[in-house]
Image (tube, helix red, strand yellow):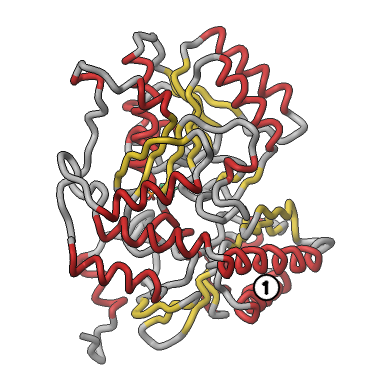
């Protein structure tokens, strides 16, 4: 379809409205025509290393043949069917595979379409759990700077409020805690104790150990354990939002495995389907499920999307979990972790590198330069990486890597070199 005068980027401008974009200030969208492994190719043929796995989805590499062949076969067999009143092999097989890798207390899975709906369902489970039990608990608890999605419930519990101005009057009631850093653990715990005496809290939603959208902010496991324990003791349901951290990114299948207290509810999406199709799962314990299991119809969870448990998405997820479980993929994950550690050693004393941190394959630091001097620093950094054939998406002055597990050592090196060049240039 490409003509000499109209590139995809140009045709795009006529009718398309992009996410998270102020079009009056944004430049042209980069047109990607192909992807393979860790690489994206634009319409001029230039290649980019996908240093953030296309928003943490394509962790086994783009157009992975094992996954695409399974989905292609499923496409010939059963494309879509209503999941209320019907079931099918891909959903059943996926439930069996997921339960095997989820924390032990997880027993039931509820499907939806994306990360926001996964957390929305988690929030509804927590609120209705207490409603069904006759408890008067309507308040939610969340971390400052957390991010849980863009629908109303998810926005309400998200702490990054810069974009929420037009909607704030319509939010759920949410109490906020700072993340425990190690130093402030006692203070944060005391704050929760005070909340508990004053308010009737239904559930606590948190991104376990890493706050993605806040800039890959990592926080203290012991502090989180103490909060989760106190929640348990006070019948506050705990909802782990593992939409970003799930499926190997922290070195474990789920970040919750790095904690002592297991959550009541877990939200998953992003890498669940390996970047192939949108889908999400909210899992829960028997205890949560049993509060809905009743002769009264109205105690059921009356939530359902048209594409719930789409067979193609389920077959993608099933193939993805098979890959994740393979020794080869676990070796890739360990190789990425070790590689980042070597790079971290190199940057360790760099005067412009601040708050360097790593958990699993996620590596991040802040570029310590005067923001005023560079004005639009984030956009200039982004342009620098793109020019160097690396797709990184800095958040403010935070530079982070969360590349596909199959990224080769040479490709990782190219990412590191582009970062070292940025350190020289800015
Ligand atoms: C991306 C993300 C979401 C929202 O997922 P969408 O699929 O974009 O709706 C929710 N929680 C976390 C932790 C995320 O990283």
Ligand 1 closer than 8 Å to label 1 CB:
no
Looking at the image, which is closer to me, 141 or 29? 141
Q: Which residue is mark 1?
A: 416
Occupied quadrant, residue 395: bottom right
Looking at the image, which is closer to me, 20 or 34? 34
Q: The N terminus is located in which quarter?
A: bottom left
Q: Residue 359: where, in percent of width, then height?
A: 66, 53
Lateral position of residue 258 relative to residue 163, left or right:
right
Q: Residue 414: where, in percent of width, then height?
A: 63, 79
Q: Residue drawn at (75%, 63%), measured in percent from left and top?
A: 341
Q: Is residue 414 above or below residue 295?
A: below
Q: Residue drawn at (41%, 38%), measured in percent from left and top?
A: 283
Q: Residue drawn at (32%, 69%), measured in percent from left and top?
A: 70
Q: The C terminus is located in which quarter?
A: bottom right
Looking at the image, which is closer to me, 311 or 387? 311
Lateral position of residue 76 relative to residue 268, left or right:
left
* Residue 417 showing in the rendered view: yes
Q: Residue drawn at (71%, 69%), measured in percent from left and top?
A: 339
Count of residue discs = 1
Residue lying at the far right in this picture: please name it. Answer: 349
Element at label 1: helix
Q: Residue 111: where, in percent of width, then height?
A: 31, 43
- Mark 1 neighbour density, 10 Å: few (under 14) some (14–19) many (20 or more): some
Q: Residue 238: where, in percent of width, then height?
A: 50, 28
Lateral position of residue 314 relative to residue 416, left or right:
left
* Residue 392 showing in the rendered view: no
Occupied quadrant, residue 233: top right
């Amino acid at each position: 379809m490409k003509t000499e005068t109209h590139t995809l980027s140009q045709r795009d401008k006529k009718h398309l409205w992009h996410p998270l974009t102020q079009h009056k200030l944004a430049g042209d969208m980069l047109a990607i025509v192909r992807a393979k492994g860790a690489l994206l190719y634009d319409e001029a043929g230039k290649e980019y290393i996908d240093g953030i796995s296309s928003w943490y989805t394509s962790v086994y590499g783009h157009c992975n043949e094992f996954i695409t062949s399974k989905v292609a076969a499923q496409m010939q067999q059963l494309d879509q069917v209503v999941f209320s009143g019907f079931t099918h092999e891909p959903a059943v097989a996926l439930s069996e595979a997921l339960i095997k890798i989820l924390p032990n207390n997880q027993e039931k899975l509820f499907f939806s379409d994306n990360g926001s709906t996964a957390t929305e369902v988690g929030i509804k489970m927590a609120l209705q759990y207490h409603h069904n039990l006759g408890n008067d608990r309507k308040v939610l608890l969340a971390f400052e700077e957390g991010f849980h999605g863009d629908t109303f419930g998810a926005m309400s519990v998200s702490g990054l409020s810069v974009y929420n101005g037009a909607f704030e009057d319509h939010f759920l009631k949410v109490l906020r805690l700072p993340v425990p850093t190690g130093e402030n653990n006692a203070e944060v715990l005391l704050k929760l104790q005070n909340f508990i005496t004053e308010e009737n809290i239904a559930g606590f939603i948190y991104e376990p150990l890493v706050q993605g959208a806040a800039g890959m902010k990592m926080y203290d496991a012991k502090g989180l354990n103490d909060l989760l324990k106190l929640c348990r003791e006070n019948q506050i349901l705990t909802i782990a939002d593992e939409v970003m951290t799930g499926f190997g990114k922290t070195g474990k299948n789920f970040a919750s495995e790095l904690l002592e207290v297991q959550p009541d509810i877990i939200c998953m999406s992003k890498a669940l389907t390996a970047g192939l199709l949108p889908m999400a799962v909210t899992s829960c314990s028997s205890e949560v499920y049993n509060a809905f299991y009743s002769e009264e119809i109205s105690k059921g969870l009356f939530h359902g999307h048209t594409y719930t448990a789409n067979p193609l998405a389920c077959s993608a997820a099933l193939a993805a979990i098979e890959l994740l479980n393979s020794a080869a993929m676990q070796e890739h994950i360990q190789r990425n972790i070790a590689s980042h550690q070597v790079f971290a050693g190199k940057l360790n004393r760099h005067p412009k590198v601040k708050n360097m941190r790593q958990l699993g394959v996620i590596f991040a630091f802040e570029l310590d330069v005067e923001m005023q001097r560079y004005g639009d620093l984030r956009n200039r950094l982004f342009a620098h990486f793109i020019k160097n054939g690396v797709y990184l998406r800095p958040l403010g002055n935070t530079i982070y890597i969360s590349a596909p597990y199959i990224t080769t050592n040479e490709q990782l090196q190219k990412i590191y070199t582009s970062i070292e060049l940025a350190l020289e240039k800015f």
